[in-house]
Image (tube, helix red, strand yellow):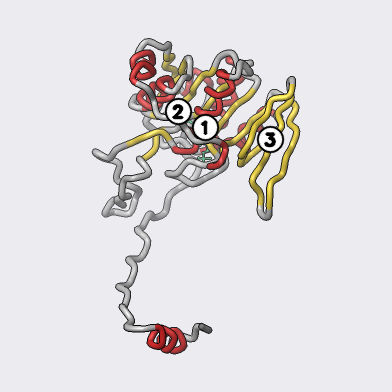
Amino acid sequence: MKVLVAVKRVLDYNVKVRVKPDGTGVDLANSKMSMNPFDEIAVEEAVRLKEKKLAGEAVAVSIGPAKAQETIRAAMALGIDRGVLVQTDEAVEPLAVARILKAVVEEEKPGLVLLGKQAIDDDCGQTGQMLAALLGWPQGAFASRIEVEGEDFLVTREIDGGLETVRLKGPAVVTADLRLNEPRYASLPGIMKAKSKPLAVKSPADYGVDVAPRLKVLKVSEPPARQAGVKVKNVDELVARLKSLGATP
Ligand code: AMP
C-alpha cells in the first residue's frame, strides 16, 4: 500500500504573529516557517505504517512556494520516500488544495491519504473532508488511532464526550489529531539521506486546477490586548472583588 501525506508550510507555532499594519494579512517576511504540526503527526503515522510493513512507499505532497521544498525535505528526513511540490506563490484555499490533491491521488493511486486535521495558519480544518468528498472516498477525521485490517482502516476519532471507532473501506482519507502519535525528531543520517530523495516540482496548471482565491479577506486584526491584572492581598479581598464583579465565589 502506498501512503500519500499532505504537508503544509506554515508560520512556526513558536513565532509571535505580526499583523501587517494595513490589516491585509499576517507579516511573514523573515519569519521562521515550519511544517504544520498536525502534518508532522500525519508524517509520523505514515513512517510507522512503513516500519510495520503495512505501507510500502510514503509520498509527501505540498502546495506552496518554492521554499515548501524545505518542508518536503523535512518530511523525507523523518522517513518519507519521495516528494511532490505543486509550486505556486498564491495563498491557496482548501478547495483548491483538495482539487490538486485529488489530481495527485489519481496519479499516485495511494491506498491511504493522510492529512493534518487543521493547518495552524488558516485554521480551516476543511481540506481532508473536501478531498474525501471530491474522491468519493470514506473519511476518518480527527483520528487518534489508525489500525489496518486488510484493505480496511479502523479509525478511532476524538469526538465530544468520547471516542468513536469507524471502519473505512480503503482507499480512504484520514486526518490526524493531536493524540495520534508523538512525532520523532529527525536524525542526522535521516537529514543527509533526505537530500538525495526524489522531489518532483509541478504547477497547479499541470493538474488543471485554478487556484485563484474565492474568498476575500476583509480585515485581519490582532486580538485586543489583555488588561493588566491586580494583585490581591488575601482570599477575603479576592472574594470581595469577585462579588463586586457580579461573580459567585
Ligand atoms: P486546512 O483545511 O487548511 O485547515 O488544512 C488541513 C490539512 O490539509 C493540513 O493539515 C494539511 O495536511 C493539508 N493542507 C492544507 N493546505 C495544504 C497545502 N497548501 N499543501 C499541503 N497540504 C495542505
> In the rendered structure, which disc, 1 or 3, sits on the residue that comes first in sequence?
1
> In which quadrant of the rendered view does residue 113 lie?
top right
Residue 5 appears in the rendering: yes
| Residue occupying the point 35% across, 19% down | 191
The foreground one among 144 and 71 is 144
Q: Is residue 122 above or below residue 61?
A: below
Three-letter code, disc 2: Ile
- Mark 3 lies on a secondary structure that is strand
> In the rendered structure, which disc, 3 or 2, sits on the residue that comes first in sequence?
2
Q: Is residue 237 above or below residue 53?
A: below
Determine which of the numbered discs, if any, sits on residue 63 in the image: 2
> In the rendered structure, which disc, 1 or 2, sits on the residue that comes first in sequence?
2
Could you tell me how far apart the alpha carbons at marks 1 and 3 are, in whole angstroms?
24 Å
Three-letter code, disc 3: Val
- Characterize the local packing of mark 2: few (<14), some (14-19) or many (20 or more) Cα atoms within 10 angstroms: many
Q: Are marks 1 and 2 in contact (CB under 8 Å)?
A: yes
| Residue occupying the point 36% across, 83% down | 234
Residue named by callout 3: 155
| Residue occupying the point 34% across, 50% down | 24
- Mark 1 lies on a secondary structure that is helix
- Mark 2 lies on a secondary structure that is strand
Q: Residue 72: image x %, image y %?
A: 41, 23
- Characterize the local packing of mark 1: few (<14), some (14-19) or many (20 or more) Cα atoms within 10 angstroms: many
The quadrant the N terminus occupies is: top right
Q: Residue 118: image x %, image y %?
A: 52, 42
